[in-house]
Image (cartoon, grey):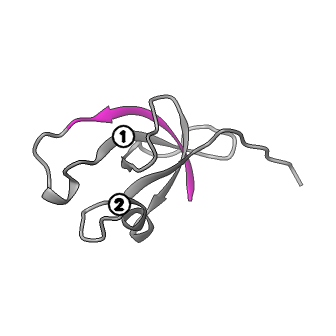
Amino acid sequence: MYIGKVIGTVVATRKDENLVGTKLMITQPLNMDLKPIGEPLIAVDTVGAGIGELVLYSKGTAARIAARKMDSPIDVSIVGIIDEMDVHDG
């Protein structure tokens, strides 16, 4: 799993039939210091995340499993909303 922040939504009225009924969110990957890393991703939201929330997301097959859509073109799924993080330096 990875950490990200939801920064927007995507509306696509025409899309692959296996994506019908999914909520698409623009998610910015973050490092452990909550700093942006890499390019934003389009993720299928499986947990009802909102803009501005910190989330956990999965990629690849794990993303399709989380969305319960194994035959879909899903690469990234939001699988959790982070309430709190506690990181201790070694």
**Residue drawn 17% across and 40% down?**
12
- 32 vs 43, left or right, is right
Q: Which residues are magenta?
A: 1-11
Q: Is residue 14 above or below residue 11?
A: below
Give how far across and how far down residue 76 sits, in percent: 39, 56
Label 1 to label 2: alpha-carbon separation: 13 Å
**Residue drawn 61% across and 37% down?**
35
Q: Is residue 53 above or below residue 37?
A: above
Give the label on residue 25, or none.
1
Local crowd at mark 2 within 10 Å, few (<14), some, or many (≥20)?
Answer: some
Local crowd at mark 1 within 10 Å, few (<14), some, or many (≥20)?
Answer: many
Helix, strand or loop at disc 2?
loop
Give the label on residue 75, or none.
2
Which image quadrant: the C terminus? bottom right
Which residue is situated farthest in the right direction here?
90
Q: Amino acid at mark 2?
A: Asp
Give how far across and how far down residue 68 sits, in percent: 35, 64
